């Protein structure tokens, strides 16, 4: 079972604020991901990383940025939040292997921008 | 383009009433197919990975099967605690995961 943590679980902020969503995992997984999920909709990949100092943009365009300075930590930052950023943000991690790698998810951060 | 569809969109069952959820996919090459369970307001919880047509996996009241074009999640004698959204995802070769929209399952006592 994966141990992956996200903070905060819930965040309500005003437009224009800078926010950072935290994600940490204790499995030593190389690959980490950020997904965005609106209610009743699919998960959409917004960022991923193969390891330290590696970051890639996902399939869904996003105004957020990520960094990967430590293996266990993959924070997501919004420089200026807008109401359109209101959504659930899910972090996941997996081992980087030759086969297909099961992704394990954190509990999510529900972001509301007023 | 790689695609995943799931049906039905929502399913209501009486406790003990067995049924199946469908995941249909179109990919150029399949590395793996995944089933997850997601409770409201939480992250998806991993259930199964299937790699090749004909493969089956079981866990408690759940059994997942895979063909070349679709996967089924069979739920035998469900209980109210099985109520959740069940997500299907495919991992195509050279691509990231593609998730379906999920099936919302409600099991009534």
Image (cartoon, helix red, strand yellow):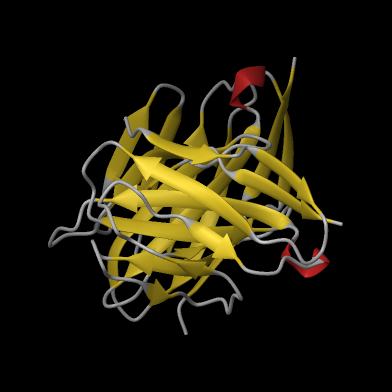
Location of residue A56 with respect to B76 vertically, above or below: below
How far across and how far down the image is residue A110, in percent? 68, 46
How far across and how far down the image is residue B107, in percent? 70, 26
Please name whichever residue, B43 or B53, is drawn nearer the observer in this view of the structure.
Answer: B43
Note whether residue B79 is visible: no
Please name whichever residue, B62 or A113, is drawn nearer the observer in this view of the structure.
Answer: A113
Please name whichever residue, A41 or B82, is drawn nearer the observer in this view of the structure.
Answer: A41
How far across and how far down the image is residue A42, in percent? 61, 61
Location of residue A63 with respect to B31 vertically, above or below: below
Left or right? Give the position of B1 relative to A10: left
How far across and how far down the image is residue B60, in percent? 41, 21
The structure residue drawn at horizontal position 66% and vertical position 52%, both measured from the top left corner, is: A88
Residue B93 location, quadrant:
bottom left
Left or right? Give the position of A41 relative to A26: right
Residue A101 location, quadrant:
bottom left
Please name whichever residue, B10 or A17, is drawn nearer the observer in this view of the structure.
Answer: A17
């Amino acid at each position: 079972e994966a141990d992956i943590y996200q903070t905060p679980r819930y965040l309500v902020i005003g437009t224009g604020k800078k926010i950072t969503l935290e994600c940490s995992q204790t499995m030593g997984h190389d690959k980490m991901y950020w997904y965005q999920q609106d209610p009743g909709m699919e998960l959409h990949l917004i960022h991923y990383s193969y390891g330290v100092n590696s970051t890639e943009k996902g399939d869904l365009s996003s105004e957020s940025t990520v960094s990967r300075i430590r293996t266990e930590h993959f924070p997501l930052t919004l420089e200026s939040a807008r109401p359109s950023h209101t959504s659930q943000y899910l972090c996941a991690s997996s081992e980087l292997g030759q086969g297909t790698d099961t992704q394990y998810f954190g509990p999510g951060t529900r972001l509301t921008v007023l | 383009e790689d695609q995943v569809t799931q049906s039905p969109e929502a399913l209501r069952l009486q406790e003990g009433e067995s049924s199946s959820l469908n995941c249909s996919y179109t990919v150029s090459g399949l590395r793996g197919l995944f089933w997850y369970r997601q409770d409201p307001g939480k992250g998806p919880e991993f259930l199964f990975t299937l790699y090749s047509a004909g493969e089956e996996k079981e866990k408690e009241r759940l059994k997942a099967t895979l063909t070349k074009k679709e996967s089924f999640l069979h739920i035998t004698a469900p209980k109210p605690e099985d109520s959740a959204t069940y997500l299907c995802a495919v991992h195509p070769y050279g691509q990231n995961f593609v998730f379906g929209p999920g099936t919302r399952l409600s099991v009534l006592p």
